[in-house]
Amino acid sequence: MGDGTGVRGLAAEVVGALREEGMTVAFCESLTAGLAAAAVAGVPGASSVLRGGLVTYATDLKTTLAGVDGRVIAEHGVISGHCATAMAGGARDTCLADWGVALTGVAGPDPQDGHPVGEVWIGIAAPTGDRWAVRAGGGRLVGDRDAIRSRAVVVALEELLAAVRGGTLPRGGGPENTGDGAH
């Protein structure tokens, strides 16, 4: 599903599943800078499910826009499951959505703060209040900057689709317990 057609089809599935459930979604994106929200917005009828999104490319915006506690960033860094779940919760709450999805990580070309290129965390905040994070690709996404960002969007949409269709259980690939009641 890494090609453009696959992303469009996956985004359409997400919109359909959310519409069937009568639910909405909001995104908080760092490394993808709005690509996930744009993929969903590209689907006809997306306005019935897409509440909005936050682009928190700069670290300080994770705190000011998404409400991530500065202690989370100080203790775990922005490239962590803890930060991803906080970002997802912040997007859900700020945009008054049922679901929140966050993407944070390193697209390259260089490692960041001791994290390798391709380390990407997807955070999910469910309507139940449950939150979890999955390390995309089971550890590391491979490819150039564009490929990593595109693949991160696919993984985020797959995780959201699985959660909406199957409840609030993470699909796998490295869920991280964030210590805040999350999975």
Image (cartoon, grey):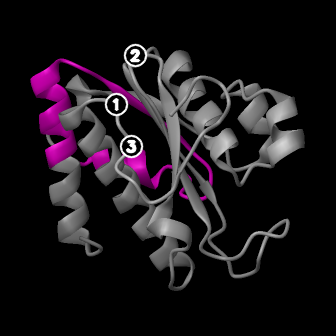
Q: Which of 158 and 181 is in front in this view?
A: 181
Residue shown at 48%/62% (left/top)? 136
Vertical position of residue 46 compared to residue 79: above or below: above
Instruction: Decide whether residue 7 is among the magenta residues.
Output: no
In the image: residue 155, left or right of residue 164:
right
Vertical position of residue 128 compared to residue 57: above or below: above
Corner quadrant of residue 72: top right
Corner quadrant of residue 7: bottom left
> Which disc number belongs to residue 54?
none
Instruction: Quarter of the image for the N terminus: give it.
Output: bottom left
Give the image location of residue 181, x and y in percent.
59, 23
Instruction: Decide whether residue 18 is among the magenta residues.
Output: yes
Q: Name the residue under label 2.
A: 128
Is residue 32 visible in this depiction of the protein? Answer: yes
Q: How crowded is mark 2: few (under 14 residues within 10 Å), some or many (20 or more)?
A: few
Element on which disc 1 rests:
loop
Q: How far apart are marks 2 and 1 (CA)?
A: 8 Å
Give the image location of residue 158, x and y in percent.
30, 53
The magenta region covers 13-42
The disc labelled 3 sits on which kind of residue? Pro
Q: Mark 3 points at which residue?
A: 170
Q: Mark 1 points at which residue?
A: 168
